[in-house]
């Protein structure tokens, strides 16, 4: 199994902690830069246009996530199957999985983007988006719908490369596009006064550059992307495996997005100050999510490769060490948010009412970071094993929580508005405990599945 050793990382041999950290660091930097897109939009729009414009962008967050999730789950499923084939050592199956995931990811985002474009206004109205920000929210959302195909292009290329252990290549192109995004934001928003429309255009141009650059580089430099005509054939069997794992992952992400929309509806009912504060805290929490998300993705690749190689003890060791890394980060972040939350919120807006509300909100949610981290660690391991049932279970739990807890807590007079952020922590806790129980109570059954065909795991619950 030959490949470019500088970019391909075999995680079936060597110290698990060292491999996970080595793989995670470039991916973490990349994820932080990707989040920087949203941060730059928010800071520039919030400071140079105003809190209403910031609220307009924030009001679209959960809806955008819903449509992006439908596409990204397929790419994630293809990446997991590819990592299992890599661990198994079958070059032909690796190439076929890369190609067939690409075919699916070419068609699916176009369909989702077109449907989303025409549903933007009705969905935002259904969520009770405040009238003062509705026009800007619709305009920004429609631009994001056009950009779904560009976001999916980058996520596809990076998912395939990461499945092969290459977390560095996606980073390099993402850094460049992030710098491009910053420059375009300044040009469109500050220079040409295009408000939220300019911020949206800057984002999708930058995503297109990172996606196409990453894919072209992979085709030129990574041996697994060197395809013959035979490799380019559509393979129904592999496509079914990709879809059987990718669709539950898409549904998981989509259910979570729908649950976030339910929470957004509650937030919108409290007016534009609450919307702006929630937008600012959500942007910060997106950054907090990144180390957890990166660790989970690293564990998914680590588990997938070792599952393909049938190395059970390494999977368990990776899970345990992943939990330790997660707890350490959670403990370190708690005092930072508790002490400096107000200063962090002030980066986004100048309105004192928004700053005060946002700072208090961060103090609430930071108490639950360890539970958030548990979700990502367990999800990474179970996804790497191809446990598609857990993907649906996790999404269903989140939907039930988001549809019930915010309404219950905000209805309590002593809690009121703050029930928005307490509900975030409660839902993280319920989802984290559910994930842990799934791993504990089904561990024997899941490891028993490893006695079968590794690449066929996506077909089993």
Image (cartoon, helix red, strand yellow):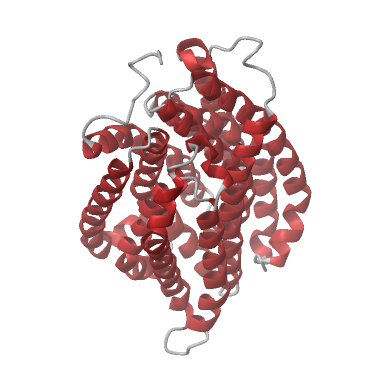
**Left or right relative to 169: residue 256:** right
Task: Give the percent coordinates (x, y) of residue 312.
Answer: 33, 43
Q: Is residue 200 above or below residue 369?
A: above
Q: Is residue 411 above or below residue 165?
A: below
Asked if residue 147 shows in the view, the reply is: no
Q: Nearer the viewer, residue 259 or 191?
A: 259
Asked if residue 301 shows in the view, the reply is: yes
Task: Give the percent coordinates (x, y) of residue 125.
Answer: 72, 64
Q: Nearer the viewer, residue 174 or 28?
A: 28
Residue at the extreme bottom of the image, as rendered: 413
Q: Is residue 64 above or below residue 104?
A: below
Residue at 33%, 38% in the rendered image? 311
Q: Is residue 383 above or below residue 456?
A: below
Residue at 65%, 66% in the rendered image? 130
Residue at 49%, 17% in the rendered image? 224
**Left or right relative to 163: residue 369:** left
**Left or right relative to 118: residue 180:** left
The quarter of the picture where residue 368 lies is bottom left
Task: Give the percent coordinates (x, y) of residue 377.
Answer: 36, 52
The quarter of the picture where residue 425 lies is bottom left
């Amino acid at each position: 199994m030959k490949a470019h050793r500088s970019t391909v990382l075999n995680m079936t041999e060597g110290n698990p902690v060292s491999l996970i950290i080595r793989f995670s660091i470039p991916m973490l930097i990349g994820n932080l830069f990707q989040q920087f897109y949203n941060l730059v939009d928010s800071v520039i729009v919030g400071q140079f246009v105003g809190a209403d414009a910031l609220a307009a962008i924030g009001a679209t967050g959960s809806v955008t996530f819903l449509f992006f999730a439908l596409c990204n789950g397929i790419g994630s499923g293809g990446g997991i199957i590819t990592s299992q084939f890599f661990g198994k050592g079958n070059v032909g199956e690796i190439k076929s999985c890369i190609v067939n995931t690409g075919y699916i990811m070419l068609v699916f985002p176009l369909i989702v983007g077109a449907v989303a474009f025409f549903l933007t206004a009705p969905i935002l109205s259904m969520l009770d988006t405040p009238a003062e920000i509705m026009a800007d929210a619709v305009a920004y959302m429609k631009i994001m719908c056009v950009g779904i195909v560009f976001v999916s292009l980058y996520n596809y290329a990076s998912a395939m490369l990461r499945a092969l252990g290459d977390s560095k290549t996606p980073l390099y192109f993402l850094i460049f596009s992030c710098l491009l995004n910053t420059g375009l934001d300044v040009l469109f928003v500050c220079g040409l006064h295009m408000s939220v429309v300019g911020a949206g255009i800057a984002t999708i141009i930058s995503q297109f550059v990172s996606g196409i650059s990453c894919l072209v580089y992979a085709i030129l430099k990574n041996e697994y992307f060197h395809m013959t005509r035979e490799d380019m054939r559509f393979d129904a069997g592999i496509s079914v495996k990709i879809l059987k794992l990718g669709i539950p992952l898409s549904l998981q992400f989509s259910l979570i997005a729908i649950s976030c929309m339910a929470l957004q509806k509650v937030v919108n009912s409290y007016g534009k100050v609450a919307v702006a504060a929630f937008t600012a805290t959500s942007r910060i929490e997106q950054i907090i999510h990144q180390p957890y998300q990166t660790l989970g993705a690293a564990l998914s690749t680590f588990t997938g490769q070792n599952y393909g190689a049938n190395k059970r003890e390494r999977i368990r060791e990776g899970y345990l060490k992943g939990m330790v890394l997660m707890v350490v980060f959670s403990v370190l972040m708690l005092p930072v948010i508790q002490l400096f939350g107000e200063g962090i919120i002030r980066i986004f807006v100048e309105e004192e009412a928004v700053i005060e509300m946002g700072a208090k909100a961060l103090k609430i949610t930071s108490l639950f970071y360890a539970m958030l981290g548990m979700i990502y660690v367990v999800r990474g391991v179970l996804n790497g094993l191809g446990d598609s049932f857990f993907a649906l279970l996790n999404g269903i739990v989140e939907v039930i929580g988001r549809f019930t807890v915010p309404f219950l807590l905000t209805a309590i007079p002593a809690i009121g508005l703050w029930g928005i952020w307490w509900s975030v922590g409660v839902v993280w806790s319920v989802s984290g405990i559910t994930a842990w129980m799934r791993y504990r109570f089904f561990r024997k059954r899941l490891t028993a599945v490893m006695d079968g065909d590794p690449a066929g795991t996506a077909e089993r619950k």
